[in-house]
Amino acid sequence: MRENDFLSKAQGCLLGGLIGDAMGTPTENMEPAAILEKYGWVDDFNGDGTDDSILKYLLCDALIATDGYATSDDWAAAWLAQRAQITGPKQNRFFVSVKQTLTKLSAGYLPREASIGNLASSSSAMSIAPVGIVNAGHPRAAAAQAQELGSLIHTGDVAFCQDGAAAIAAAVAAGFAPAATMESVLDAAVRY
């Protein structure tokens, strides 16, 4: 893949996720009928999204710091270094599982233990797309890294959330293949 094509796809992936997150922010947890009644058809946005986007950019920082080889330890370090992103003015945007993880990390828990007892959430899956980017064209590697990173928030009874993150990362990585199709992307998400 040419560098310009890669950069365009990476930028589209990150910006598309941010725009979708920002558009969904005012309607989060609302039923379609309530959204239609309150907002009509949502085709614009104002703001910068939810915890999904914040966690995604903390993950980007960890990936950049490790040349793409971030682990849950590295992502935890980014959380601790920038904890104000989670505890500051946007703290009401975060799911309980993320807040629980940060509390445990701040108390000295090891990253591999911080997810024990957490509630299920979409947090790891919704923030994992950068792992697909750094593993472009290699969905199996993306899924494996996503499983490891997702363990920061979800293990044990809620480990299925890691599986969701692995599927998203694999799909993003497969989407970077020059001959990617919707079928090849969906196949990678299910396979890995």
Image: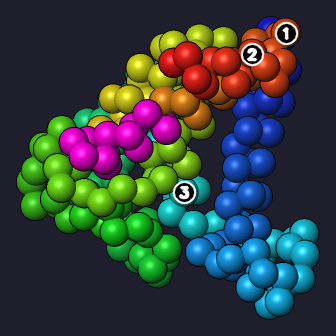
Mark 1 element type: loop
Q: Position of residue 2 (x, y in %)?
A: 83, 11
Majority SS type along the magenta span: helix
Q: Residue at x 66, y 28 (%)?
A: 172
Quarter of the image where one finds residue 100: bottom left
Q: Residue at x 81, y 24 (%)?
A: 182
- Circle 3 sits on which residue? 52
> Mark 1 near mark 3, Cβ–Cβ under 8 Å?
no
- For label 3, count other residues whose C-alpha is less than 10 Å away and answer few (under 14), some (14-19) or many (20+): many
Picture disc at residue 184: 2
- Above or below, 178 against 48 in this view is above
Quarter of the image where one finds residue 10: top right
The stretch in magenta equals 152-165
Amino acid bearing label 1: Ala
Considering only order in the chain, which callout, 2 or 1, is on the residue closer to the N terminus? Answer: 1
Query: Where is the N terminus found, in terms of image quarters?
Result: top right
Q: Position of residue 22 (x, y in %)?
A: 71, 66
Count up the numbered dots.
Answer: 3
- Above or below, 177 against 118 in this view is above
- Circle 1 sits on which residue? 179
